[in-house]
Amino acid sequence: MTPEKTARANPEPRLLHLREAGVSLLIDLGGEGLPRVLHWGDDLGDLSSEQLAELALAGVPPVVSNTLDEPMSVAVLPEPGTGWPGLPGLRGHRDGRDWSPLFTVTSVEAGDGDEDRLVRVRAEDATARLALVLDIGLTRAGLVKMRAAVGNLHEAEPYTLDGLVLALPVPSHAAELLDLTGRHLRERSPQRQPFTVGARVRENRRGRTGADATLMLTAGVPGFGFRSGEVWSVHVAWSGDHTTFAERLPDGRAVLGGGELLLPGEVRLAPGEEYTGPWLYAAHGHGLDAVSERFHRELRARPHHPAGPRPVVLNTWEAVYFDHDLDKLRRLADLGAKAGVERFVLDDGWFRGRRDDHAGLGDWYVDETVWPSGLWPLVEHVRALGMQFGLWVEPEMVNPDSALARAHPDWIMSTGGRTPPEARHQQVLDLVHPEAYAYVLNRLDSLVGEYGIDYLKWDHNRDLVDAGHSPYGEAAVHRQVLAVYRMMDELRRRHPGLEIESCSSGGCRVDLGILQRTDRVWASDCIDALERQSIQRWTQLLLPPELIGSHVGAPYAHTTGRRHGLAFRAGTALFGHFGIEWDLTGASAAELEELARWISLYKSVRDLLHTGRTVRADHPDPALWVHGVVAENGSEAIFALVAMATPVTAPPGRVRLPGLDPDAVYRVEPLPPAGTPAGVNSVLPAWLTAGRVHLPGRVLGRVGIQAPDLYPEHLLLLRLTRTS
């Protein structure tokens, strides 16, 4: 897109109406002030300039008692100087001065090409000597996309930037908030509350996205669900400290917003320097599924989005942990290949001194005492079986008990004068140091090049605490994140076929910033299928299934102590990027045969699962979950009926199958190997006993079918095929 510049020396009223994928974004660029969003939501249709002007006029609020003499409007970067009493868009100062800038627009660059429709607005505050650049647009998927940059125009004095956030208005009937929280092994847990007067501010200071990250902050009509209720959501595409907020004023106006959270003194702009914040993405729809679909379409449109079938993965972690015995690993590879595995990943424990998690991080050389011939015996064996080879690394971390830490204690992030508390017996390696950055990049480049590694599981197993840059200890989370981004980008440039997984104590780095340079995320270190049902359900709010690693674990879950049958474990893993993390050398012949059937099923349906629309039904009983994937053209679908607990009623009643072509007729039939549930409390429903039923999509979506009375922690898979 080549923007067409429009001079704004003498600004005139101008309304810009962007429309994409059922969404309208109406931006008021009139006057000298920063742009205001007058409408973000349902497509308003093809309105004339006169109608747009009338719409703008219809939204001007009256002046009420004890307020400003003129109606106050909030810009996408809210300014206290306009009378906005909420969270300022720009916070900073120049030794206590220039703390409340009021920008004047100097130019607008608008374009409409084959790519996203973006508007670039440039503005200045001549008194504060600050420059501002705002990028605002609507992507082909219907996502609002915004970013801001601030520059210091002063000839001699620096400017300390304390915060830069952007905001979008939401209507008064968006009266309920949903965000996510969580912890290690239980990431992405939903929580709701009324959207009342005041601010709901979520600040993340972990130096990574965090297990308790908001993921998306959503406002909607009370009681909104996956398939109903108008909703508005925002996501900050950044992998470090960040903030999201929802704020409602006493006059009823409300905004959603977010940006990077800056630590004290972290960004200090010298004369002529500029800071650019992360992208803020925002989605509107009717029901959470509509919001998810916009994000999924956006991610799938990326040039580097994984192409082709997502390979079946075998990861060694819960199979062997640190016990790297070559014979056992070869046997594991043999069994995996026989079952249909396509990618073998050697996890933690392969490098010098790494017999447990107390030592070795930073010493990225193959341990000669364990691997006297290097990794070649295993790599060659894996490749001879027709599988790709992947390797676990944790490049941003260092154990104090390592050659690297002993040689370069100055490369450990700290505020100076003390060492941060350890977590998992490790510290954070300061990649802001050019020498540390070069060392890690060289080791990764050498390993990938020497062994032709296809895939890196890139881990990050602790929060950034006292994350300062030596020798003076100034806050450096911002620069650390940029260094990690730069390293991943450079490694992929050198090795174009390399895939990278974002793993961070499991699911602690899941955001659209890291997803610009990675190919999947590890949703959680917990692969207990019951926990994974919830974790994957809410991770898919942002990410499509093919980007979410989901593995079949052992019958006995290592992280929870629960036991599940293979059908429940594999049926859960099916709706992601399918893999195995189980010591197959201890599995029975019957288990291996059943696993092979599941892998065969995954291979036969992964094209549907990884290109179709994710749908989730709003069932009244929280014990029964219904989710599935529907082909883009509506030709087929796969649904899972999941008993998360014991239903309140027996039988549990009808379940609706949403997202189908309402005018098409579908054959609904059970899908083996989980198509004939062993875990039922009673006789199967008549239609399931018959083996199939034919009904229109409208009937299946509105009336549904009778669910079987499943035992808790069991599931039933259904295949739907359009017949007419």
Image: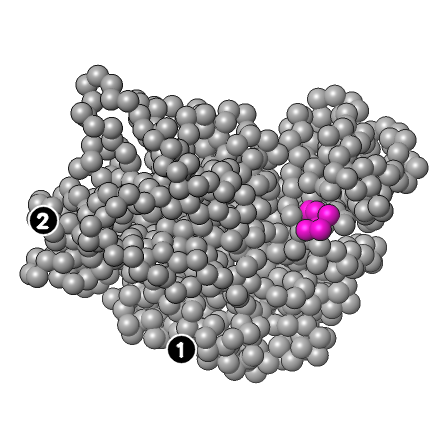
Q: CA distance from mark 2 to mark 1?
A: 47 Å
Residue 498, placed above or below residue 241: below
Crowding around mark 1 (Cα neighbors within 10 Å: few <14, some 14 to 19, many 20+) is some
Q: Closer to the camera, 714 or 73?
A: 73
Q: Amino acid at mark 2?
A: Thr
- In the image, is 629 to the left or to the right of 281? right
Dot 1 falls on a residue whose secondary structure is: helix
Position in image of residue 687 (x %, y %): 88, 34
Position in image of residue 478 (x %, y %): 30, 56
Check contact, mark 2 vs mark 1: CB within 8 A: no
Q: Residue at x 86, y 28 (%)?
A: 682
Residue labelled with disc 1: 442
Residue labelled with disc 2: 127
Segment tinted magenta in the rendering: 629-634
Residue 630, placed above or below residue 400: above
Choose the circle earlier in sequence order: 2 or 1: 2
- In the image, is 483 to the left or to the right of 140? left
